[in-house]
Amino acid sequence: MQLDAVEVLFLHYADGKTKEEALQHDFWLTEYNRKPAELLASLLNSGAIDQSQDLSVTLTKFTVPIIKDLLKKSGIKVSGNKNDLIERVKQHQEFIDLTGLKLTPVYIVHKSFETFLHNTAFINYISLHGPVTIDEAYSYYLNHPDMTPSEIIIALHEEKIAENLSKPNKYEAVKCHHLLSDYYSSELNDLEKSLDHLNQFTMLIVLQSIQRYLQLEHDQQRNSFFNIDNYTIEKYRNMLLMKQFTINELYDKLMEHAAVLPYSDNHIRLAAQFIIRYIIGSAQAEIKLTEGLEETQNKE
């Protein structure tokens, strides 16, 4: 029996949870129009999950002080982390009084599905971010079963970028670049790739603003039309402080990374100059940009 995308996501969610925990949220009904009880039943019927009463999983529901108290009352040492303590309880359970604990069975993924669980780890990331859907992601996985979760996440977002760059509204491309920049940095520690996507994200923001600005009548054009969010600006400033590149090198990288974007060379140059001025806090950033745009319009 092949699981569908929502069932795969629920498999990741239910792993390590009690029945009460697995069924407590109505998120599944509101987000996916699926009842959690039915999803749970489907996973049980398919053999994807089992209920376990093994102490190694049931004791995870208790705090470290409670587990230590069990050991202490039986004269057993209480050093180590939570996993160490649980293992010690298992080793000495015949000497430990567990009657005071309400040990509840916990759902765990069946051994035959453990590799599948690992290979579909991408679905958690996809469910928490956009604009790729879990159905798109799972379908892609089924067609590319040899790809790692990271490779799938990257490929899906790169495809979404390519699809949306030719559209007037490039919001999804902008969002995908932002997500990939964070993903390369936080998950893969690839700072060069992270910067590539950060630059394309920031350039798209400014270039799209330029497009909207030029569509306005002259008397509608105003100051404070162009801006970049503080989070992005601080990322650039921190990288400069860490001497990952100089301000001149950043300008060159902005120009290089934006070369694939569907805008004129002049607008790309003006956008890159605006970003550099904005990062260094120049009060002239927007003035210089609008002057450059007016100069271009006059020449045309």
Image (tube, rainbow, N blue to C red):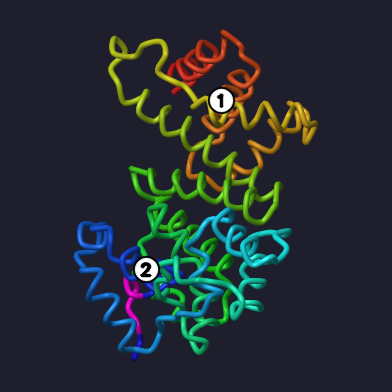
> 295 or 236, which lies in front?
236
22 vs 291: above or below: below
Q: Main secondary structure of the magenta part?
A: helix
Q: Is residue 221 left or right of residue 282?
A: left
In the image, what residue occupies the spot 39% across and 30% down? 211
> 92 or 208, which lies in front?
92
Q: What residue type is labelled 1?
A: Leu
Tell me the residue that label 1 is attached to.
Answer: 270
At mark 1, the secondary structure is helix
Segment colored magenta: 3-7
Q: Is residue 107 left or right of residue 150?
A: left
At mark 2, the secondary structure is helix
Tell me the residue that label 2 is attached to.
Answer: 136
162 vs 219: above or below: below
Q: Where is residue 67 in the image (x, y as percent from the top left)?
A: 57, 61
Quick one: which residue is furthest to the right in this view?
A: 243
Specify whether residue 64 is painted magenta.
Answer: no
